[in-house]
Amino acid sequence: MEQETNSEIIKKGRRAKAASFDCASIPTERKNRFLSSLSKALTEEKTAVLAANEKDLERGAKNGLSAALLDRLKLNDKRIEDIALSLTQLADLPDPVGEVLQSWRRPNGLELSKVRVPFGVIGIIYEARPNVTVDSAAICFKTGNACLLRGSSSALDTNLALVKVIRGTLTKEQLPEDAIQLIEDTRRESIVDLLQASSLVDCVIPRGGADLIQFVVRNSVVPVIETGAGNCHLYIDGDADPEMAISICSNAKTQRPSVCNAIETVLVHKEWAARNLKSLVTALQSRGVECRGCEVSRLIADSIKRAEESDWATEYLDLILAVKVVDDVESAIDHINTYGTRHSEAIISSSPKSVEKFFSRVDAAALYHNASTRFTDGFEFGFGAEIDISTQKLHARGPMGLAELTSYKYLVRGHGQVRE
Amino acid sequence: MEQETNSEIIKKGRRAKAASFDCASIPTERKNRFLSSLSKALTEEKTAVLAANEKDLERGAKNGLSAALLDRLKLNDKRIEDIALSLTQLADLPDPVGEVLQSWRRPNGLELSKVRVPFGVIGIIYEARPNVTVDSAAICFKTGNACLLRGSSSALDTNLALVKVIRGTLTKEQLPEDAIQLIEDTRRESIVDLLQASSLVDCVIPRGGADLIQFVVRNSVVPVIETGAGNCHLYIDGDADPEMAISICSNAKTQRPSVCNAIETVLVHKEWAARNLKSLVTALQSRGVECRGCEVSRLIADSIKRAEESDWATEYLDLILAVKVVDDVESAIDHINTYGTRHSEAIISSSPKSVEKFFSRVDAAALYHNASTRFTDGFEFGFGAEIDISTQKLHARGPMGLAELTSYKYLVRGHGQVRE
């Protein structure tokens, strides 16, 4: 079995590498035409895709998948239409490849330019959602990259059907079919093999939960863009406008609690807490939020349950919020830099000094003043696309749009220069 | 022992992390004053540093280190002066931290800006040269980063003496002493511990030979910037000017054969080879270069030794050059993309079509037309500093100057915006 796994990764990896050299120079118009053509093909092939999806759903139900997981796995007319629409939107975005980032001339006459180029081959490792298959393939293709898609076993039939449509469209458009390939071996070992294939894969991006991400980070020799996990905080300063603070806190916790940019802890300045914590807790509880707080918070609002040390480090992804009363903005910053995951952090304050301190000292991809953390998103930032949200500092940080899937190279033009 | 190792990395890592929050906002003038002050202090403390270096040299000689290694380890008046001078040059460079890379406004009134920030804590893992200690510490400090320096056991006394001067200067300038720390445990296990400390270290950079780099890449959970290894090529096209081609080939091979941007293989178009290969080989041999070639090359110039398959993949770092005759620019590109290490690749040609093909299809950090690969260097590129040369595509590619040691964060200013 071991050998067979390797042979799939190596065989497809080599084909992807070969295709990547062609992909790097496909003209923008042809890439966009492919995206529009794929959008149409998905609508046309809807019946076949839905039939394959039905098989996955049946197998999933038999294997006892949770209702939430089955819902993530499920495609229907509306979801396929949404995928098709997102492809035409992607076609409308500017192509980052070939952009001259900088150019200059040296005293010895060498002409240098720094030009944006694709990575080459990107490995995408993801979980149940089948829309990620099309979305990842399309974004990689638009940015001139070949990709290897490693989805989960629960979505295998759907993914095979989708990739058949994708590759059929590549062929129809006379584009390199091996630019987009699905890894069909869904055992965990095949992820490890992909993560070790550093001569064939230039970069891997895990798109999924914290366990998958940590597995990828711990096992990869290929450079990884770490994504996702968000233990995000809202800090309410002493002089914060109560109405605004309550509105933003409710939004950041309850508008969609299952996503990484929702908050998990609210840190409340002691003076604000004395005046307003009760109202905040009432507002949250009316929206079904369970509050777990420090001792001081429980003296003020006794409906708050007792928080354990582990609560400060937990990404609930649920209608639960940890509450801590702090002495000042410095204590809030220390708490965030200790427990945060460098994702999104917000301060509600009327004091420019507090905001300045928060912005300069909190270590995170996105910092907010008087706004909800829920805006950390490629579309909300105006990028027009998003492959995921990076929580590392190397290469890309925060929402990753098209430019974040590219590297650069230096082109140097001379007339015989040698080094003395 | 295990526990003690961990405790050094964890203790110093925590201190470095704490210092990094201060480092991020030290004003440029104070950072530059530190660099000038360190430059003076090194000159003043020269005697102590040279005495420590003498101990390392004696121990090295007793342990049978090669003459080349002892030379790398050695400091003298001139080398210390050079280090001191490079610090004042670094002080003169612009500070990348705080630069606003982009700013824009969304339709909902959110004001976004993308601001350059330090990584936080950088781990530098390096070998014998003691100048790397000062150089790495200074570049990290200038870019607002704290650093953990892990040098080799052969240079331990020198490194301790240098870091004493560095930390003394930090204290004197009322700057956080723990911004710059030396890991004194020089067993290989301490590298592994550093590479696993992902909550304390934001990025590691190996500065050394291929073995060290591969060890770091294979064992790191912390994001790595892969550096250095250079199996570089020069391709001489059919119509290349013979004099220019011979001059550049000699320069790229012999001007300093021990460095990563020297060439290891010359690929020669068959037509050019028929006319000029003999002269090229004669010129190279007159400079002491041993040529190892393919069968065709040996039919043209019989002083060429027979190359093995392994020669195409070898970074000689010595006066040896592999020679291969190829049919056309496409074959040269295929050879480079198969055996190259994505470092620096050059074409000598008078055909714009060949150059265009070479520039668009060769996958490397720096591509040259009619110039020597030896220019891949932060100073030659005009960056004014260089921490190393990246051969990966994530984050930084090619020579890394100051900006390449930074990340960014998004600052978002609102007035109560929530997500609908």
Image (tube, coloured by chain):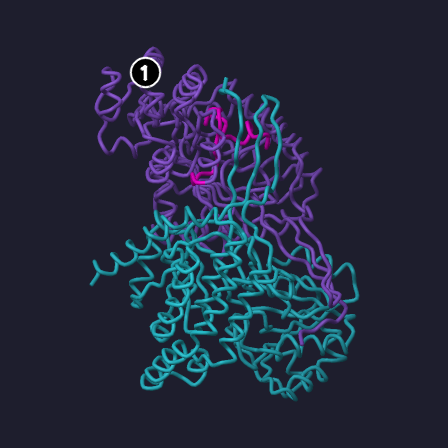
Chain colours: A cyan, B purple
x and y percent of residue A100 in the render? 59, 41
Instruction: Using a 10 Å C-alpha cutoff, classify the residue at mark 1 as few (fewer than 14 neighbours), some (14 to 19) or many (20 or more).
Output: many
Q: Does the magenta stretch include residue B379?
A: yes
* Chain holding disc 1: B
Q: Is residue B261 magenta?
A: no
Which quadrant of the rendered structure holds the C terminus of chain B? bottom right
x and y percent of residue B127 in the render? 40, 34
- Left or right, A12 with reference to B92: left
- As rendered, which of A70 and B4 lies closer to the eye? A70
Tell me the SS state at disc 1.
helix
Observer able to see residue A48: yes
- As rendered, which of A271 and B95 lies closer to the eye? B95
Observer able to see residue B59: no
x and y percent of residue B285 in the render? 32, 13
- As rendered, which of A246 and A205 lies closer to the eye? A205
The residue tagged 1 is B281
x and y percent of residue B144 in the render? 61, 44
The stretch of residues the image draws in magenta is B361-383
Asked which quadrant contains residue A236, the reply is bottom right
Up/down of A282 relative to B289, above or below:
below
Q: What amino acid is found at the position of numbered circle 1 in the picture?
A: Val
Up/down of B199 relative to B182, above or below:
below
- Left or right, A191 with reference to B35: left
Numbered circles on residues, count? 1
- As rendered, which of B41 and A321 lies closer to the eye? A321
In this view, the residue farthest toward the top is: B286
Q: Residue sitting at 51 percent across and 65 percent down? A: A228
Up/down of A70 relative to A105, above or below:
below
Up/down of A261 relative to B135, above or below:
below
Q: Residue sitting at 54 percent across and 54 percent down? A: A29
